[in-house]
Amino acid sequence: MGEEAKVDFAIVGAGIAGASVAAELAHHGSVALLEMEAQPGYHTTGRSAALFSTTYGPPPIRALSCASKQFFANPPQGFSKHPLLSPRGVIFAAAPGQEATADALEAELGTMTTRISSDEAIRLCPLLRREALVTALWDDQSHAIDVDALHRGLLRQATSIGATQRCRAEVIGAVRDGDGWRLETHSGEVRAQVVVNAAGAWADTFAGICGVAPANITPKRRTAMIVAAPDDIDLTTSRMAVGVEEDWYVKPEGGKLLISPADETPSPPCDAAPEDIDVAICVDRIERVTTLKIERIEHKWAGLRSFAPDKNPVIGFDPVVPGFFWLAGQGGYGIQSAPAAGRAAAALALGRDIPGDILDAGLEPSAIAPARFRTAV
């Protein structure tokens, strides 16, 4: 017989989204963090390219990322033994015929990037192929994120305050019970006043279990792989490079190179695996824009990034079903925006205003509200 619990907030999904809001809500009520896998962060959180960049993503994401920067730079005392960020820098590389795209991106990002010459781009990232590069933008404020330290720190913060964490606790049934919820999980029953849907690729699936209409969250597969770096390239100084049309990227990673075709292939929620065609596309794209000759792939994987139709996150109470809170659709930006997204979500779940510093960073609340997809009846 499974364990029974009664809490103020039941958070479904213990990836970075669930962990971030749990660390905030635990200060204000009892929290149960429910994870269907044997360990938190098994799916998207554990398969991220781990980049912090305020130039990356749609406007709400950039605002949440800007508002998260202070946390990354100065986390709470004892949060992590190591810094959460390390300098990286990103070059947005434009190939012949992509000049207009580079111009548009520069106009959109304003002072967040600087136009640099092809020679300067190759100095910063010697992997780039000269004949495949006509101009570039330079973002010197981007950093690599220690995702594991961030995720573990948030989980530890939540449980140290009193949140409980259950793994192998997939929700298999849910009903409204008075003014709250009764959830049936593989580890027992949980009663909660508020259910937080932080289920990632399974967000719409879990909503269906609760009798809530979907937010049309679409999981999309992203492929990545690790390859060896040339012996004559110093990866300690080489920067990350991204195609200006976001159709490839290459990033120094632990003495190797992480490469991706930046694919976004719609997928059912699943334990994603790389497909041969995506691996082949990745190798072809990377070899076209860099001097790499990829003869062996040391490791390959895929993860699911989940998007709402407008690609903005979905954060807030469902406008129709009481006590059902959305924290989903973070796309590929959920880690870099997690500290501020967790604070914003906790405030809304508590019936409060989004913190002023997040609004000052440029977040428009209506851009993330679930009500933008449907209205209350």
Image (tube, helix red, strand yellow):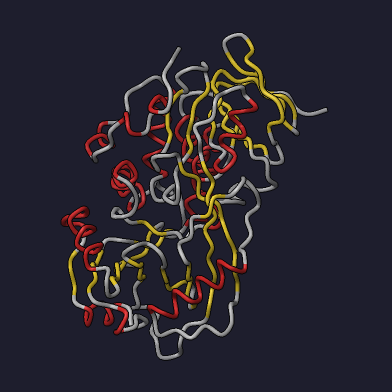
How far from the left and from the top, in percent, is residue 69?
Answer: 31, 49
Residue 142 placement (x, y as % from top left):
31, 61
> Is 282 above or below relative to 310?
below
Quadrant housing the C terminus: top left
Q: Would residue 116 be found to the left or right of residue 204 on screen?
A: left
- Please state the horizontal and vertical placement of residue 314, each as a whole percent of the image: 43, 34
Residue drawn at x 62%, y 51% is 42
Instruction: Give the residue at x 19% y 77%.
Output: 117
Outermost bottom residue: 232
Extreme residue toward the front, this view:
97
**What residue is shown at x 54% (from left), y 70% (from top)?**
225
Given residues 54 and 3, the one toward you in this image is 54
Residue 356 x %, y %: 25, 31
Residue at (28% x, 37% y) in the render: 363
Q: 36 or 369: which is nearer to us?
A: 369
Task: Residue at the far top: name it.
Answer: 178
Spot the residue most to the right.
1
Give the side of residue 164 with respect to residue 320, left or right. right
Quarter of the picture holding the N terminus: top right
